[in-house]
Image (tube, helix red, strand yellow):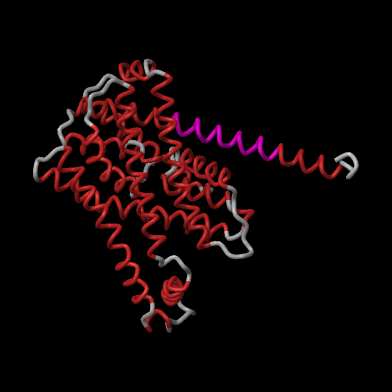
Amino acid sequence: MTWRRVLLSLLSAALGLLLIVALVEFSKIDWRATLLQLRSVSWMSFGALVVLNALLILFSTLKWRSVDAVLRRSSDSTPSRAAAFAITSIGMAIGLVLPVQVGMTIARTLGTYFHGGAFRRGTAGTLLEQSFDLLIVAFLAIASTLTWLTKGEALVWFSSAGALTLLALLLAGPLIEAARNFTALDRFQNANPHTRFGKLLRGLAELRHSGLLNTGLARRLLALSALRFTVIVLMSYQTAQAIGSAIPLWQFAAAVPFVVVVTVVAVTPGGVGINELTSVTALKVFGTPVFAAADWALANRLLVMASCFVIAGLAAVFLLVRKLLLSKTGEWNRNSSPKEI
């Protein structure tokens, strides 16, 4: 790592801390009181958050495995379901100290290093599956905007969000077919492979025959992204319940699309500060007092962070124990004679 990157990392972390301090000062919350609230969180409430976070990781893992099934070649091996889950959980944990997409990409690229096609499957696969999160969130952001413009509440958001999610699933087929026809144009097929732009066009043309432009796959990824969004909303509501906050569920649902969009361009480690400011602003728009929103945002950051590290730790221990047991079993089989067996 160069000194320039170290300096940029330090400046990024400093910016995140500065934004958190600004949020505390602006909302006039007592951070000591927030810490006391966290100490009073019951193990049952935290356990429910861990379960929801594990479900979130499971949906992310299923999305990645769906894309990986198309990207991997016959010579590549496939990580087990447990390994894929552990890699994703570790990526989520790394995403708390690095930009989220970077953390997940690093974890999956390293996790597939010994399975073949690490960059293609780890980096490209992650970016592709996460693009469907952005696509479904773009539709849901329309529902949030509609709710704000009409001054609606739960009924308006949930009904419009349901209709827009269904619309996204229905449009998957025509959009995939349009993309297939677009990449079949001569401009893509006959591009000069000796230039960077030509290589890009050739790469896009190859998508037509890769299996990625598949309606069934697109709808599966969109459906899993919608489920993932639902879990994020439930996690937000769970952390609010854990600290005794009375923020309505529908306000979290309406606010989360904007937070997810901002997360993509967040330049601070794990989106620290930027995510919190966006959450507070969006919740304020939909009727939550700034004090309550800021109090929840800080508590949510710490509780979700703790649950991520718990899951990543348990998954890593599980994989280590599993590997040790398999190696012991293999050693026992090699050292045992047929008679002994």
The relative height of residue 308 versus residue 149 in the rendered view (above or below) is above
The part of the chain drawn in magenta is: 306-324
Q: Where's the C terminus, which quadrant? A: top right
Q: Main secondary structure of the magenta part?
A: helix
The relative height of residue 117 versus residue 177 in the rendered view (above or below) is above
Closer to us: 295 or 316? 316
Q: Is residue 121 magenta?
A: no
| Left or right of residue 70: residue 341 | right
Q: Position of residue 42 (x, y in %)?
A: 39, 18
Is residue 245 visible in the rendered structure shown here? Answer: yes
| Left or right of residue 316: residue 333 | right
Which residue sits furthest left?
150
The relative height of residue 57 versus residue 305 in the rendered view (above or below) is below
Is residue 11 visible in the rendered structure shown here? Answer: no
| Left or right of residue 75: residue 234 | left
Closer to us: 208 or 124? 208
Q: Position of residue 332 (x, y in %)?
A: 82, 39
Give the residue drawn at x 47%, y 52%.
64
Give the residue drawn at x 33%, y 48%.
226
Give the residue drawn at x 45%, y 29%.
306
Q: How many marks?
A: 0
Closer to us: 298 or 224? 224
Q: Position of residue 319 (x, y in %)?
A: 62, 39
Quadrant in the rendering for residue 113: bottom right
Give the residue drawn at x 61%, y 35%.
318
